[in-house]
Image: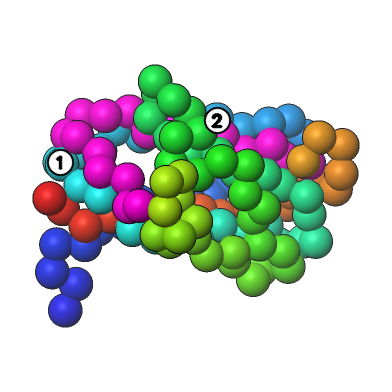
Amino acid sequence: MIGTKFTQSFHIPGTLAANVSMYYTVPADCQLIHVSANGSNANDGLLDIGPSTDTDGYLDGVSIGDSNVPAEFDQDDFVGDEFPHIVDGTIVVISLDYDGAGGTATHDFTLVLTFTEG
């Protein structure tokens, strides 16, 4: 039973040639409880997630997974070691440094955010 959990997923196919920013408005008061992120290759991608007022306020400069093995992030990985509480209507910003400032570019980026309502 999933209960009040919901997910939001993103996928960008191909080899990235520039940084990526995505914007998502949460549909209800919620907490971010899990993030899964990877590229299909060995890559140097770095991920930030936060509200539009502090774009690395939830996750700050974490390495995504390699070769289709997602890196997972949960409570002890979030800024402040707490599940971020997000108010209904907040714009969540996802920023991927596609090559970690000069390393190997990410291929086929996939991201899944898991939330619980409340």
Q: Write the residue at 17% across / 34% down.
A: 88
Residue 67 higher or lower than 10, as above or below: below
Q: Write the residue at 72% across / 64% down.
A: 66
Residue 40 versus residue 86: which sits nearer the camera?
Answer: 86
User: Which portion, as a residue range, is magenta?
Assistant: 82-99
Quadrant placement of the N terminus: bottom left
The verdict on residue 87 being magenta is: yes
Drawn side of residue 8 relative to residue 62, left or right:
left
Check disc 1: other Cα within 10 Å, few if <14, some if 14-19, many if 20+: some
The verdict on residue 17 being magenta is: no
Q: Write the residue at 40% across / 23% down.
A: 52
Residue 21 can be seen, yes or no: yes
The amino acid at mark 1 is Ala
Residue 66 higher or lower than 2, as above or below: above
Drawn side of residue 32 relative to residue 10, left or right:
left
Residue 46 higher or lower than 110, as above or below: above
Check disc 2: other Cα within 10 Å, few if <14, some if 14-19, many if 20+: few
Q: Position of residue 32 (x, y in %)?
A: 32, 51
Residue 28 image label: 1
Query: Mark 2 and mark 1: span between their CA atoms?
Result: 22 Å
Q: Which residue is mark 2?
A: 21
The amino acid at mark 2 is Ser
In terms of secondary structure, where does tag 1 sit?
Answer: loop
- The residue at the far front in this view is 80
- The residue at the far top in this view is 53
